[in-house]
Amino acid sequence: MKKLVSMIIFTAVLFLSGCGFLEDTQNTINYATETTEYLNELSTAAEEIQTLMNQGNTADLDGKLTEIEGTIQEFNSIEVPALAEGIHDDITAQNEKLLETIDQVQSNGEIALEELKNTEIVQTIESITSFMDQIEQLGFE
C-alpha cells in the first residue's frame, strides 16, 4: 500500500513539474512573438519617420511620435518570462532613450523638426530592432 501511495505521489510531482516546464516554454514563445511584432512595428515606424522628416510634415510626424510613445509604454509593461529578462532589460533601456529623445523634440506640444533631424531617433530605433536575432532564438524559430 505504501508503495502504491508513493508511486502516485511521485507521478503527481513528475506531472506537475512537467506542466510548469510547458507553461514556461509557452510564456517564452508568447513573449518572443509579442517582441517580434513590437520590433517590426518600430522598424516600420523608423521608415515612416524618415519619410515624414524628409517631407517636413510636422503634423503627421508628431502623431507618429505620439503613437510610438504609446507602443513603447505598452511593450515595457508586458509580462516577461525569466528566460527573457536580460533581453527585455536591454530593450527597455533603449526604449527609455527613445522616449527621452521624443520628449526633447516635442517641446510645448509642438515638434521641433530641426531638432528632430539632429537627433539619432532612427538610429536608436534601429539599435532596438537589432535584438531581433536574440528574440527569434527565444521563440525557437
Image (cartoon, helix red, strand yellow):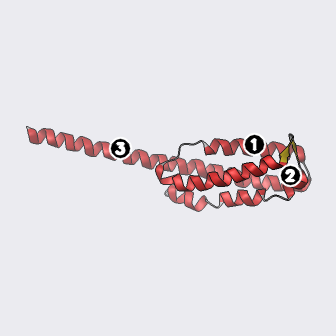
The first of marks 2 and 1 along the sequence is: 2
The foreground one among 2 and 105 is 105
The foreground one among 4 and 124 is 124
* Residue 16 visible (yes or no): yes
The first of marks 2 and 3 along the sequence is: 3
Badge 3 density bin: few <14, some 14–19, many ≥20, Cα 10 Å: few
Q: Residue at x 66, y 58 (%)?
A: 129
The residue identified by callout 1 is 67
The quadrant of the picture occupied by the N terminus is: top left
Query: Looking at the image, do the residues carrying marks 3 and 1 touch, with CB atoms under 8 Å apart?
Result: no
* Amino acid on which the number 2 mark rests in the picture: Leu
Q: Secondary structure at mark 2?
A: helix
Residue 17, image x, y percentages: 32, 45
Q: Is residue 54 left or right of residue 17?
A: right
Residue 33, image x, y percentages: 56, 49
The first of marks 3 and 1 along the sequence is: 3
Query: How many badges with numbers are in the image?
Result: 3
The residue identified by callout 3 is 19
The residue identified by callout 2 is 52
* Residue 141 visible (yes or no): no
Q: Secondary structure at mark 1?
A: helix
Question: How far is mark 2 from mark 3, CA to CA?
Answer: 49 Å
Q: Is residue 29 left or right of residue 68?
A: left
Question: How far is mark 3 from mark 1, CA to CA?
Answer: 38 Å
* Amino acid on which the number 1 mark rests in the picture: Glu
Q: Residue at x 73, y 46 (%)?
A: 68
Q: Is residue 90 depicted above or below 18 in this figure?
A: below
Question: How far is mark 2 from mark 1, CA to CA?
Answer: 14 Å
Badge 1 density bin: few <14, some 14–19, many ≥20, Cα 10 Å: few
* Amino acid on which the number 3 mark rests in the picture: Cys
Badge 2 density bin: few <14, some 14–19, many ≥20, Cα 10 Å: some
Q: Residue at x 60, y 56 (%)?
A: 90
